[in-house]
Amino acid sequence: MKIASLQELFVDELKDLYNAEQQLIKALPKMANAATAPALRQGFEKHLKETEVHAERLEQIFEGLGESPKGKKCKAMEGLVEEGAEVIEEEMEPEVKDAALISAAQRVEHYEIAGYGCVRTYAELLGETKAAKLLQKTLDEEGKTDQALTKLSEQINVEAEDPDDEESGGGTRTKTKSKSRKR
């Protein structure tokens, strides 16, 4: 399909975001189950509820535009969700897995922030004031989620760095060094 106008691009990118949110609705419960830190698990559960609201807001926008939200697959989110699934399956110390889950989640948040920022700007340019306000609300929430993940990482990443000083005592560094020698 040829996109010939900003209005068509706006609708196309809204469909992409809607599919991205649908994929996240399926992925977030798996991330919550994989998290070992209670605060991280609760954060994923809270963001799942927010994500459901984000999808509902997009549905409101589509209704206002007289368009269907369906018909596009967000390949970027598919890749990000796949990377998150790999983290879940990977054998890691619990604290390290939590750090990796935060990293995967922040990649998702940054993608969403970029997408929502663009479509909000399109809405403003197109005079879609109600849509712009709804998109800004979601953009604000995505930013707060990213900040919350950063705050959690400040504690969890420290725990991952040294979960048990005697056992890990440089084991990871040794593995890294031995890998570099093989090159």
Image (cartoon, rainbow, N blue to C red):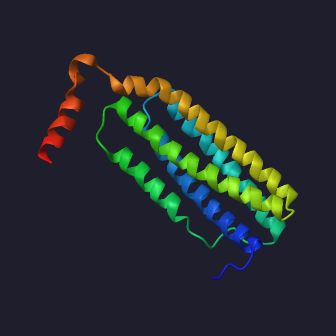
Q: Position of residue 66 (x, y in %)?
A: 81, 72
Residue lying furthest top in this view? 166
Q: Position of residue 46 (x, y in %)?
A: 62, 38
Which of 132 and 26 lies nearest the eye of the viewer? 132
At 57% from the left and 47% from the top, the residue drawn is 110
Residue 167 against residue 54 in the figure, above or below: above
At 62% from the left and 38% from the top, the residue drawn is 145
| Quadrant showing the N terminus | bottom right
Q: Position of residue 92 (x, y in %)?
A: 30, 37
For residue 98, what is the image quadrant? top left
For residue 15, what is the image quadrant? bottom right
At 61% from the left and 55% from the top, the residue drawn is 21
Please give left or right for residue 113 compared with residue 31 in the image.
right
Residue lying furthest bottom in this view? 1
Please give left or right for residue 32 compared with residue 64 in the image.
left
Which of 177 and 86 lies nearest the eye of the viewer? 177
Residue 153 against residue 3 in the figure, above or below: above
Q: Position of residue 85 (x, y in %)?
A: 40, 50
Which of 5 and 27 lies nearest the eye of the viewer? 5
At 59% from the left and 32% from the top, the residue drawn is 148
